[in-house]
Image: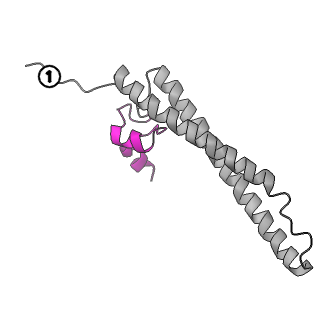
Amino acid sequence: MAEQKEKVRYSDEELAEFKEIILNKIEKAEHDLTLLKETFANDKNNGTDDTSPTFKAFEEGSDTMSKEANSQLAARQEKFIRDLKNAITRIENKTYGICRVTGKLISKERLKLVPHATLSIEAKNRQK
């Protein structure tokens, strides 16, 4: 009986499956980013010019906060898209799913939840 060797990389079929998941996530993330940017653009004029000065001051304060929150969300979304696109590159290089610390395969379950992961749970726990 041949000894079962530990897998060093995912098969082309498995990589194709992950690629499909990631491409869907990129599409959704880019759609969400577009919505965020549109909201940000529409926030500039919200038709409160005729309201009382006191209310206007509060509104401008919350406006500034929501613009800040919106731009943070947009930046986070752009980073997420970048990470997903980097994962696509790793799939094409056939290095996808390999932990950058341990060199072992990251579990399929983890990759399905966090498809842009570059660390196994074991490596992630070591960081804490």
Instruction: Give the image quarter of residue 123.
Output: top left
Lateral position of residue 100 relative to residue 32, left or right: left
Report whether residue 10 is seen: no
Q: Secondary structure beneath disc 1? A: loop
| Nearer to me, 72 or 29 | 29
Q: Give the residue drawn at x 45%, y 49%.
A: 127
Which residue is tagged 1?
3
Q: Quadrant of the N terminus?
A: top left
Colouring rule applied to residues: one colour
| Nearer to me, 125 or 56 | 56
The number of discs equals: 1
Instruction: Give the image quarter of residue 57.
Output: bottom right
Q: Confirm whether the magenta stretch covers residue 81.
A: no
In the image, residue 86 sits, relative to residue 56, either above or below, namely above
Lateral position of residue 7 relative to residue 35, left or right: left
Neighbourhood count class around disc 1 (C-alpha, 10 Å): few under 14, some 14–19, many 20 upward: few
Q: Give the residue drawn at x 49%, y 38%.
A: 116
| Nearer to me, 109 or 9 | 109
Q: Quadrant of the C terminus?
A: bottom left
In the image, residue 82 sits, relative to residue 121, either above or below, namely above
Report whether residue 128 is seen: yes
Q: Give the residue drawn at x 60%, y 38%.
A: 81
In the image, residue 41 sits, relative to residue 48, either above or below, namely above
Lateral position of residue 21 relative to residue 79, left or right: left
Q: Position of residue 22 (x, y in %)?
A: 49, 34
Q: What is the residue that sits farthest to the left in this orientation? A: 1
Q: Confirm whether the magenta stretch covers residue 105.
A: yes
Q: Position of residue 122 (x, y in %)?
A: 36, 44
Q: Position of residue 23 (x, y in %)?
A: 51, 32
Q: Position of residue 108 (x, y in %)?
A: 34, 37
Magenta segment range?
A: 100-128
Residue type beneath disc 1: Glu
